Image: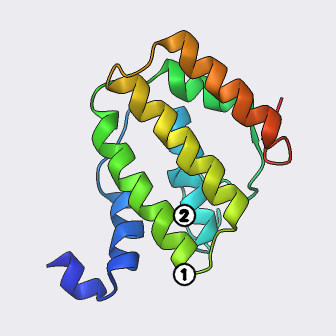
Amino acid sequence: MLKWLLGDRRIYDIVSAIRGCDSRNWCLKLVFSARFRALLGCDRTLYTGAVRAHKRIAKSILKCALDGLNMSDEHYLVHAFSAISALYELGLIDNRESYVLTEFAKICTKLLTHEIEYKEAVEMLDKLAKEYDDIIMS
């Protein structure tokens, strides 16, 4: 029904990432949901929740998101992947930021599904931060 009301699959994907599946991991929501809100034009006057206005993010927030992951976040990340893709298709997010968010979501998913160990996830994050220091602040 919601998909029908919203019409465009991309809008549905973004809205369901922001208001659908929730996470108890505040840092993970700051990485994804808070940024999605800002990209859609929400600000603190329109929305009382977290809004991350700038694409730059501290590596410590990403590390906090890794530290707080739990199995319920796997579903949250599925929606985040769809929203990133939709935001990119709609021209609301640039290629570099889209790539960083997608790669970080992949790291989280691989850690949750035990494809990688925590140490490897941190190493992957460090490499991503080094390559994209214009987005990930040390």
Q: Which label's residue is closer to the chain start, 1 or 2? A: 2
Q: Quadrant of the N terminus?
A: bottom left
Q: Residues within 10 Å of mark 1 (few under 14, many from 20)?
A: few
Residue at x 56%, y 16% (from the top left corner) = 120
Q: Position of residue 6 (x, y in %)?
A: 30, 84
Q: Nearer the viewer, residue 44 or 2?
A: 2
Residue identifier under label 1: 90
Number of numbered labels in the structure image: 2
Residue at x 62%, y 75% (from the top left corner) = 92
Q: Position of residue 119 (x, y in %)?
A: 56, 10
Query: Which residue type carries mark 2?
Result: Tyr
Q: Position of residue 81 (x, y in %)?
A: 43, 54
Residue identifier under label 2: 47
> How far apart are labels 1 and 2 at the CA level?
22 Å
Tell me where residue 42 sits by quadrant: bottom right
Which mark lies nearer to you, 1 or 2? 1
Q: Residues within 10 Å of mark 2 (few under 14, many from 20)?
A: few
Residue at x 68%, y 65% (from the top left corner) = 95
Tell me where residue 114 sits by quadrant: top left
Q: Position of residue 3 (x, y in %)?
A: 22, 78
Q: Is residue 49 visible?
A: no
Helix or strand or loop: what does disc 1 sit on? loop
Q: Quadrant of the C terminus?
A: top right
